[in-house]
Image (cartoon, helix red, strand yellow):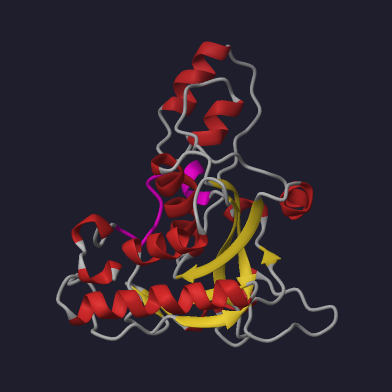
Amino acid sequence: MPATKTARMTRASTSPLLLAVFVAGMGNVTGRIAADLGIPGKSWPTPRTTETEFAALTRSDGDLDRATFGAGCYWGTERWFANNLETKRPGCVRATSVGFMGPEPPREGEFPTYKEVCTGRTGHVEVVQIVYDKTKCTYEELNDHLYTFHDPTTKNRQGNDHGPQYASVVFAHDESQRKTAETVKAKVQRAIDAGEITDYAGAKVRTAVEDATVFFPAHEDHQRYLEKRPGGYCNHRQRFSWEGVKLGRM
């Protein structure tokens, strides 16, 4: 993932109309930034929460649960859940946050930074953590969606992004999630073997299913990155639709 660029706007005395024209003309200033300025934008349907609000969500509502997925660059992974899936299944995705998770419990005081994770030496994966409403969609449906927009057959790689931080991983929060993740992974493999999914680079699903550990949220600029910059870097795309897969549903 290329380094991000932070735009700095110099405060100036100008009219609201001129400000609106200026912002509307900037290709990387839309979504919530535009909405905050009172300009029609392209905000995602899933509301943005603060870290504190996000952490408290599942404690305040028994219908909510967490899911954590790694599928390459977390900018795109978040968009495919917070925007794409929530548009298709309103009410399913209640909140998202991008960050890092490792397969091993962290050492005391450890809090990996984006630059450290990008070295590939920390063992952490770029992930999106999702709070979803169990009355609106199932954990299995979240796993189904995961495989439609990334390539699970390329180990530690999505397109131009190489390294262990870009691994395809399902971090299961309990035994039920682990079983479901393994079931969906096997379903995808059957569909590949049957020639019903053909838009992957390889023929073997390499997605790992690991126990969830500690989630470390990324810094604020990377949260909802592609909502703020809809034309930004992303290797994810629609690869297939489950509506066209028959054997994979068995």
The answer to whether residue 100 is left or right of residue 41 is right
The segment highlighted magenta reads 225-237
The answer to whether residue 41 is left or right of residue 132 is left
Query: Which of 104 and 16 lies nearest the eye of the viewer?
Result: 104
The answer to whether residue 208 is left or right of residue 96 is left
Residue 141 appears in view: yes
Relative height, residue 232 to residue 35 (above, below) = below
At which x and y percent is residue 208? 48, 83
Relative height, residue 117 to residue 60 (above, below) = below
Q: List the single residue furthest toward the right.
A: 108
Q: List the single residue furthest toward the front.
A: 250
Residue 168 appears in view: no
At which x and y percent is residue 210? 57, 82
**Main SS of the magenta segment?**
loop
Query: Which of 143 and 215 lies nearest the eye of the viewer?
Result: 143
The number of callouts visible is: 0
Please state, as top left, top right, bottom left or bottom right, where the N terminus lies in the image: bottom left
Q: Residue at x 33, y 75 (%)?
A: 187
Q: Quadrant of residue 14?
A: top right
At which x and y percent is residue 138? 50, 56
Is 245 one of the magenta-colored residues? no
Please state, as top left, top right, bottom left or bottom right, where the C terminus lies in the image: bottom left
Q: List the single residue furthest toward the left.
A: 195
Q: Residue at x 47, y 39 (%)?
A: 90
Q: Quadrant of residue 21?
A: top left
Query: Which of 234 and 142 lies nearest the eye of the viewer?
Result: 142
Is 232 one of the magenta-colored residues? yes
At which x and y percent is residue 223? 59, 52
